Each structure stands twice: as C-alpha cells, then as structure tokens.
Image (spheres, helix red, strand yellow):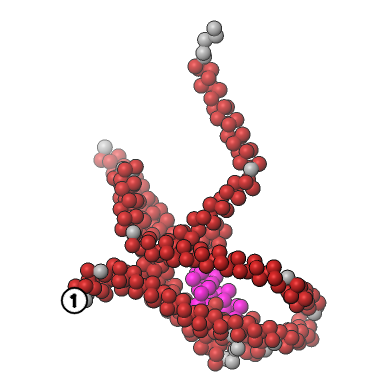
Amino acid sequence: MAKFDTKQFRSLFPYFILALAVIVAFRVVSELSFIADIIAQTWRLISPFFYGFLLAYIINIPRGGIQRLLEKTKIKFIVKRKKALSIFLAFLIFVIILVLILDLIIPAIFNSIAFFFANIEVYYQSILDLVEYVNNLDILGFHISPEWISGPLEEWIDNLRIQDIIQNFGLETLNALIAFSTAIFRGFLTFISSIYILFEKEKFKAFFFRLLRAFTSPTVCDTIMEYAGKLNKNFKQYIYTQTIDGLILGTIVTIQLYFLGSPYFLILGIMLGIINYIPYFGSIIGSIVAIIVVAFTQGLPRGAIAAVILLVTQQIDGNIIQPKLMGGSFSLSPLLVIMSITVGGALAGILGMIAAIPIVAVLKDMLDSVTVYYEQQKLEKSDDAGEN
C-alpha cells in the first residue's frame, strides 16, 4: 500500500483551492440569471419590512421630540404611557400629512398635467417659433433642424394613440388593479411592521449589542457602537436638515413661480422641495427643469426672469439657509460630496445618493481617527528613539 505523502498534498492544496474557486465561479456565472431571480424573489419578500424599517426610522425622529414633550407634563397617565402615546401621535401626524397630500396636492398635480396636455399644441408651436428665432440669429452658422424636435415628439404622441389605449383597456385595467392591490398589501405590511419596529426598538438594540459583545472584543464592540451612534446622529441630522430646507425652498419657489404666472407653480415647487434631498445636484437639476418649463410655456423673457430668480434663491439657500440648519455637521469638500453622490447613486440609486453624505461623513471621521492614532504612534517611536 502506497504511503500518503503529506508534504506533496500540502504543495498541491493551493492548486486544488484555485481549481475549486474556478469551478464555483463558472457555476455562479452560468447560473447568474437563476441567482438573480432568487435575489429578486427574496427582495420582494423582505422589501416591505425593509421599507417598514425606513418608515420607522423616519417617524422615530419626530416621535422622540413628542415623547420629550409628554415627559414634561404633570399628568401621570400621560407620563406612564409616553412611549405608546408618542408613537400614536407621530403616526397620526404622518397620516394627516398623507391625507392632505392625497386630498389637496395630488389633485392639483393632476390638474397641472391635464392642463399641460390640453395646451401641448401651443407649447409645441412655441418651441418651433423659438427654433426659428435662434436660426434667424445665425450665431456662428449654428442651425437647429425642426425635425430634431418634431420627430421625437410626433413619435411620442403616436405612442399615445387613443385606439390602442381603448383596445388594450381591459388588459391594462386588470394589470393596474393587480398592481394596485399588491401595492396596497405591501404598503399595509410596511405600515404595520414599522409600528412593531418602533415598539420593539429597544429590544432590537439590546439584542444587537449582545451579539457584538459575544462575538467581538470589548474594544471592537465599543468602537462599533461609537461609530454606529455617530452614523445614526448624522442620518437624523441630515433628514431633519434636508426636510426643513426642502420645505423652505419648495415654498419660496412655489410663491415665486405663482407671481411669475406659471400654471405649473405648485408641481414645480413640490418637485424642487423633494429633489433637494439630493445635495448639490438636486436643486440644480430641479431649477433647470423649472426654467425650461417656464421658458417653453411662457416664453423666453419669463424663462430668463425665472433663471435669475432661481439662481438668486439657490445662492441664498446654499450660503445662508443650509449652513444655518446644518451647523457644520457635514464639513465635506465639494469634490468629496460629488464623488459620494456619484458612487451612492451607482450602488443604490436615489436612496444611495441621499444616504451617501451621512455615511461618508462617518467614514471620514473614522479615517481621521485612524490617521491621528498612527501619527501618535510614529511620534512616540521617534521620541523613544531620540531618548535612546
């Protein structure tokens, strides 16, 4: 019987691991669509609870303030049940805001959209007149072909053919009802799970802390808890700041466009307030869209006035309002902010762009701490070498 050569086996073991890794990688690539389907199905199952966590996290911000107010009351019944009452009041405020949006803002938005489609021929003609005006200026021989605009627009209108809509009405209605029912059910799960998450918040935190203490050293555990606390603080500060700033900016722009005579003042103001959650790019993109809409629906002079007004408003917001609200919480360079938003958007879309700034601020803080630690270590070694 041949003797087992341990040394030879050890020398061949890395090649075995490499071959196994190649086989696994090949299988993963060949079954990529299957794995993607599993991930998609898993996400469909857990997404209501994920969004429930996000909703609970957002609602927990005003809930904490409400609970602190209830603690100051002298009524024992309220103080004893302050947590449940604060959760109830926070959700009540959320539902009231949701009802106001559904009852007041959404109908106004639909009216604006209906008004746009009713006047689309007028806007189309104004665009053609603008093209003709630019061509008549003959700036450096620059010429815009009307077909560049009429072609895509006619194709888009052709895709909205009434006959096709009527023919497919039954199927489209059925699909819409199924999608609506699914959305209602998932929304209900999200809402209910967020309530339970808020009630069980302390238990989740205690369980997570127990896991950290069980599987990490005290130093690592303390470090993770410290930076998790900073990340939580950054997220709360960012959501609070951008919400207040978005409300201020959206209100100001809505009033400005109203006095400018734009029929789309409300929808443009809401859009600017919401898109303001994306730092730097959000308000810029929103302002450009608003200027284009005003220019094409009210003419170039009004568009130029809107551009000046929105530029001044942006400068006031970026240099006075936002710094006052943030109070230096996110002292990041513009280049780092742009890089963060780009990477966050590539990884997780809009949510990634919104979450990028608080996360990068904590990562920068961690890097600064590590740098200071190693600088001190290097300084101590040089001092010891000098004494010797």
Q: Is residue 132 left or right of residue 52?
A: right
The image quadrant of residue 382 is top left
Q: Magenta region, mostly helix, strand or loop?
A: helix
| Residue plotted at (51% across, 69% down) | 278
Mark 1 residue crowding within 10 angstroms, few (<14) / some (14–19) / many (20+): few
| 387 or 257, nearer to the observer | 257
The image quadrant of residue 233 is bottom left
The C terminus lies in quadrant: top left
| 213 or 75, nearer to the observer | 75
| 239 or 178, nearer to the observer | 178
**Outermost residue, top side:** 1
- Count of labels shown? 1
Q: Position of residue 76 (x, y in %)?
A: 19, 73
Q: In this view, does 174 lie to the left or right of 49?
A: right
| Residue plotted at (36% across, 67% down) | 60
The N terminus lies in quadrant: top right
Q: Position of residue 17 (x, y in %)?
A: 55, 30
Secondary structure type for disc 1:
loop
| Residue plotted at (53% across, 88% down) | 256
Residue under circle 1? 74
User: Is residue 118 in view from this perspective?
Assistant: yes
Q: Position of residue 115 (x, y in %)?
A: 65, 86
User: Is residue 307 in view from this perspective?
Assistant: no
Q: What stretch is highlighted in magenta?
A: 272-291
Q: Where is residue 306 in the image (x, y as percent from the top left)?
A: 58, 86
**Amino acid residing under circle 1:** Lys
Tell whether position 284 is magenta: yes
Tell whether position 238 is magenta: no
